[in-house]
Amino acid sequence: MSQKTEPTAPGTSEKRRTWDAQSLALVAVFAALIAASALAPGIPVGSFGVPITLQTLAVALTALVLGASRAAAAVGLYLVLGFAGLPIFSGGRAGLQILAGGSAGYIVAFFVGALVLGALAQLVVRRASTRRRTLWFFLAATAVSVVIVHAFGVLGMMVNLKLSWQAAFVADLAYYPGDILKNVVAALAATAVHRAFPDVLVRRVRRA
Amino acid sequence: MSRIELAGVRVTVPVDADSGPREKVVLDGVDAVLAERRVAVVGANGSGKSTLLRLLNGLVEPTSGTVRVDGLDTRRETRAVRQRVGFVFTDPLSQLVMPTGREDVELSLRRRHRDRAARAAAAQEVLDRFGLARLADQSVYELSGGERQLMALAAVLAVEPAVLVLDEPSTLLDLRNRELLRRTLAALPQQVVLSTHDLELALDAERVIVVEAGRIAFDGEPTEAVRFYRDLCGAGSGPL
Amino acid sequence: MRTQRSGGILAGYVAGNSWLHRTPLAWKFLAVLVAGTASFLLLDWRASAAALSAVVAAWLTAGLGLRRLAASSRVVAPLFAVLFAFQWWQQGPATAARIVLNLLLCFVAAGILTATVPLQDLLDSVARLASPFRRFGADPERFALAIAIMVRSIPVLASAFDEVGDAARARGLERSVRARTLPVVLSAVDYARRTGDALAARGLGEADDDTPSA
């Protein structure tokens, strides 16, 4: 109700579209949501110490709720502050050192994945019927986790931990069941958010 | 005294349901000129009074009709309107952006004072004026509800708006803090428009507007307006 | 969404004029970076314990107080306890101690930064990093504001996760990822919208040049 429509005066159409205060707040709060979910205790799976947390769920959710550019900004903000030293990476870690560990690939994948999944979410909102939205959200999230998140994750372990691709693939395999579950929850939650707050993404996409 | 004019204001929100009406009417046929020092708006939850207040500084734009503050259109001249009209929300925690009151007041002053030292001095002056200097460096989470509300008020008044709009400022406060808020408001030089469920606070005003189901149901002298509102609620004719 | 507890280590500026308060931000930032490296470099729990003692000593000599240290650690204590127990089981007591001590080291070091630098200064510095990108559309002012809101929101959302966890337990839903996530997300969106409204009402957060009439 309180969502302000963008001022579209003649002559400003060529101007870079800037976010309004609502978007700024959404980006910042979702960055905080990713941080808060990463601070919940991780469940280390596999032998190479990469913990499963609610974090991947929060990242997928951010993309499905905010759409491409704002989701990328939220993940970017989270990463920059984590690199700068706020203890907000999984397990309370902080700093650029995170890039030296086994999770480096996944960290990079968060950003790329959010961008791609966000774009897909906008497509789903525009094209799919409201009833099918959850299913399409789930399929998009799963495609992105297989093609982007797991691929980057395997690559990261190969580079940093000097694993063979077979070993890295097996280590990464342990995350699939958890990821499927998390993508189901992310799709359901995103649908619920869009029903409760249509002005966050739905109206924005339809207006464009 | 600023002159706030609402002319033929209608506000609707789109409804995304697959069937049924495409939009919901929140406010309709609102015409009013507010130029009194103290105006209170009362009405049931969902009556549209919060939307009415949000119109005043451009947080909500009329779907049709116009809202002007001293001749400035809230839709086209939003920035100028917001410099003139300060807004205080029910929950100060969603309003206070920074972790401490001092930093929040300084945030308000960012546009006004580019120089850090000048900004700090101006913030100190504001905090002293409201007797908040003692609490300024505490986490806003450690303040009591009333202290938080005063801090939020100070952060808004730091930029000296001509009009202050408050959306149910006393709803989350206990009796003592409510009295503190009442005294603080009474002492303000600003023009004040507030919405409230607290009829005592409404009776402090010079003019009371009763909003019911998206329309102005009564507009006038406080004791009469409050009597009207009591009858309205007692008769059970409200939508909720 | 509301929390009575203090903002924890993320929102803990303590006014003062100690040697640590006077130390330039860049040095303190460097110290945090070094502490971050420690969790990858210190491989013996005794070395970690020594480093942690040094950081705690710095905390105390800066007059930040033992009570505040305990209060800010309270937020992470349950997490570290679980981690410690788990790592003991997995890798034995020495490794478990090392991991947890290294984490505490990072936390206290990061805590010193936030306790002795007003958040505004911290933000101004990070936002300055965005200045070179201004011509590509970066706006340091709004970047700083986004950082401020994010940092402020972390304890709010962390306590929302706690509360929702309790509520899920009370209904016997503690194993439901959905019951433990969805209410947090919905309230987060609501919180973001209220924050966005509050920013807009104060004339903050809108870009400087997008209102034609300004």
Image: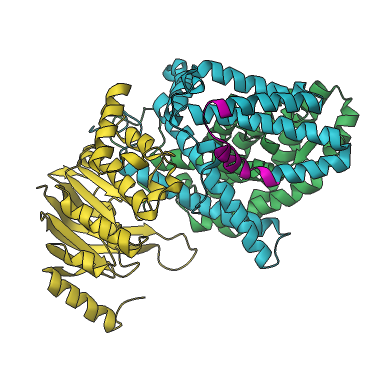
Chain colours: A green, B yellow, C cyan
Query: Residue placed at 81% from the left, 24% from the top?
Result: C43
Left or right: B26 with respect to A24? left
Could you say where residue C60 lies in the image, as x and y percent from the top left? Answer: 57, 29
Pick the front one: A140 or B89: B89
Above or below, B71 against B227 in this view is above
Above or below, A24 against C18 in this view is below
Residue A132 seen: no
Q: In which image quadrant can residue B84 be found?
A: top left
- In this rendering, the count of numbered labels is 0
Left or right: C27 with respect to C81? left
Left or right: C38 with respect to C31? right
- Residue C64 belongs to magenta span: yes
- Would you say the magenta stretch is mainly helix, strand or loop? helix
Residue B61 seen: yes
Left or right: A124 with respect to C42? left
Query: Residue placed at 77% from the left, 48% from the top?
Result: A178
Q: In which image quadrant can residue A45 be found?
A: top right
Q: Residue furthest bottom?
A: B235
> Looking at the figure, which quarter contains the N terminus of chain A?
bottom left
Query: Residue placed at 42% from the left, 29% from the top?
Result: C120
Q: Give the magenta part as a residue range.
A: C60-78
- Residue B197 belongs to magenta span: no
Could you say where residue B91 lies in the image, as x and y percent from the top left? Answer: 38, 54
> Looking at the figure, which quarter contains the C terminus of chain A?
top left
